[in-house]
Amino acid sequence: MALIVQKYGGTSVGTTARIKRVAKRIVETRKKGNEVVVVVSAMGKTTDKLIELAKKITPNPKGRELDMLMATGEQASSALLAMAIHDLGEEAISLTGPQVGILTDSAHTKAKILKVNTKRIWEELRKGNIVIVAGFQGADYQNNITTLGRGGSDTTAVALAAALKADICEIYTDVEGVYTADPRIVPEARKIDVITYEEMLELAGAGAKVLQSRAVEFASKYNVKIHVKSSFSKKEGTVVMKEVKSMEDVLVRGVALSKNQAKISIDGVPDVPGTAAKIFTALAKENINIDLIVQGAPDAEGKSEITFTVSRDEADKAVEIIEKVREELGAKRVTCDKEVAKVSIVGVGMRTHPGVAARMFSALAKENINIELISTSEILISCLVREKEGEKAVKILHKEFELEKE
Amino acid sequence: MALIVQKYGGTSVGTTARIKRVAKRIVETRKKGNEVVVVVSAMGKTTDKLIELAKKITPNPKGRELDMLMATGEQASSALLAMAIHDLGEEAISLTGPQVGILTDSAHTKAKILKVNTKRIWEELRKGNIVIVAGFQGADYQNNITTLGRGGSDTTAVALAAALKADICEIYTDVEGVYTADPRIVPEARKIDVITYEEMLELAGAGAKVLQSRAVEFASKYNVKIHVKSSFSKKEGTVVMKEVKSMEDVLVRGVALSKNQAKISIDGVPDVPGTAAKIFTALAKENINIDLIVQGAPDAEGKSEITFTVSRDEADKAVEIIEKVREELGAKRVTCDKEVAKVSIVGVGMRTHPGVAARMFSALAKENINIELISTSEILISCLVREKEGEKAVKILHKEFELEKE
């Protein structure tokens, strides 16, 4: 008997008919003798619709109230899923994030999980229940409802799997696994059978939307094996796990594209210590995540340019914040370019095979694609390019590293 | 400075535009220097829609999961209302029933409030917040979400007013107050300015849908003054309060009609002690509320007939339960008549003015309306009649007791 955590995304539970189908799959897993904990997202586009409703009331709803509102989506789907399981003759109980005891910080709309209390879940499992947990949500110390940000249900699932020491965490989604590239861009893209946490993390950060980064971080930290599968088929998906030696044989695991990028530059920044700290502290205070950062060498007047990227939907807010800091710093000008995209290649093999970056830059150069910013980690190389050239860049790199081949 | 509890029903917050209007009224109350706690129902027909959704999953959803599902309606509207208040520049915070600390029993879908913890509300009031509480819901000892049954938001409001020792509990609804009869049936019906808890209670039980009975009971027990008003006008409504001497001058305060009635009869019940107890214990166990009860005198064979009424939507369930008890009792037959209605007159004046019942029966008889069952209390007389004659009976009685006159 295994303890299995399953997570079903919004598309998988988008209609009552789909909820019933998901219930069947859960009951099958239970009947094989497993203990099952299920994490469920809100039905279909519920979260978007709730946000739309809030925007009809006020253009800038407070995070606390938005969380209160959004959390109803998963609460409803978890109750409906429990009902569908009852209808199949199995015992089940739904629990909200606060009921489970998912304690988070108070960063509303993007809260982080601090602790998971498993007492209630164990009690319900012992009673013979399949436990359905509303994903994406928790409560802070003051018992205010919080949400974990987009894709937060993945994090809920992995956090529960870690806390319960589950045998596996199955993430059901509308795709069949993680691919070497987005198949809509590269039709030859292959499904990846096994990928390391690090690679998955870099791919997610680079724009692959299959799993939320925070969920993978959590999985890596607590060594939770994730199996990404389609909820519409029975095929094996992609296993995300700890690196094993043989995985280094592959040079590049996948190529990712992120269009949701904006490049912000601050011109004429006096080259004195603490400048960068001031800028990025101001952004961090408002919970804005920075991706790439480049600081140029100072010019003759001792002024330099600082450029960084943020997700496009936070660009306006970031510019607003930076404008305030600019005056204080005595910098010249803030500019924002939203027509950029980030293309990245990822693979643990890079660590042991040099020259990957050079191959990447050459391949892009050969096709006249200009690289505006570069960022690298041990297993990732990202390039910022014009947005309209992003998809072409992905195709070039997928071919260059022969990812279509087994 | 007063502490005011306001409750807004589903129609009052049926659209985002209406939520904004309600927010304005709340802010006006606050700006007059009052502390304000608001209880809100789900938007419009949300609760019905959620139940519909559940029925698409399974014909008999379990109460616990139904509560989990239904409670999302008020959670959403309370968050939206808080946002609308923020948009007007005032501080507000929304709280779910469980967050407030509304402790109930575990009778899902019709839970009773056991205790109200006011700690969190006082904290928020002290911070200068208008506190918006999701009506209709609470949590049991195991922290399962419960709901209080139809109209439960009224009960939430009164329970909070009692626990907070509020100066008044204003119930905003889509009518202008309590009327001497339903104005759709009797166009001459007058708005009642002041009514006692007992009268209101009997009227509610008799079918007047303005306030939920449990809310009035609560108000009576803790002496909470209720002001029923329209959320669409600024007119004075109806005050529900403790009886004062002058209120006895009115013989009949109002006439009510309840169509949601079913009459169940058990034939050939052996006339031995404990029979009625067995029947009504079986029904009570399943939480079915009985209204009128009549037991006939035993016939020559020592058998008698027991007749009682239940709300029509519980009739089938009641018959099912009684069928099981019937065999055990050795009774002959169970019949159910759903084409009945209950017409009632209510007034504290009855206590001091005899002959009211006789006048009621005569008036109905004169118009050939047959009375099938009678039930009386100190301040109420109810008659069960054919459903199709119900409205006519109301008109006759309104006229007989001259309720159209001041």
Image (cartoon, coloured by chain):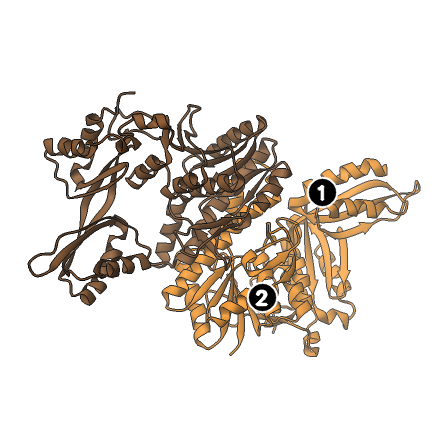
Chain colours: A orange, B brown
> Which amino acid, mark 1?
Ala
Spot occupied by residue B353 in the image (x, y as percentages of width and height): 24, 30
Give residue A146's position: percent from left, percent from top: 60, 51
Vertical comparison of B174 with B63: above or below: above
| Residue drawn at (83%, 44%) of the image | A305
B69 or B307: nearer the eye? Answer: B307
* Front residue of this view, candidates A317 and B263: B263
Identified at 76% across, 57% down, the residue is A375
Which element type, helix, strand or loop, lies under badge 1? helix
Residue B7 or residue A58, whichever sits in front: B7
Q: Could you say whether the residue bearing mark 2 is in a helix, strand or loop?
A: loop
User: For the residue carrying disc 1, how many other residues have a C-alpha within 10 Å: few (<14), some (14-19), or many (20+)?
Assistant: many
Earlier in the chain: of badge 2 and badge 1, it is 2
Disc 2 residue crowd, few under 14, some 14–19, many 20+, Cα 10 Å = some
**Residue plotted at (36% across, 27% down):** B245
Q: Most extreme residue toward the top, as rendered?
A: B406
Disc 2 residue type (three-letter): Thr
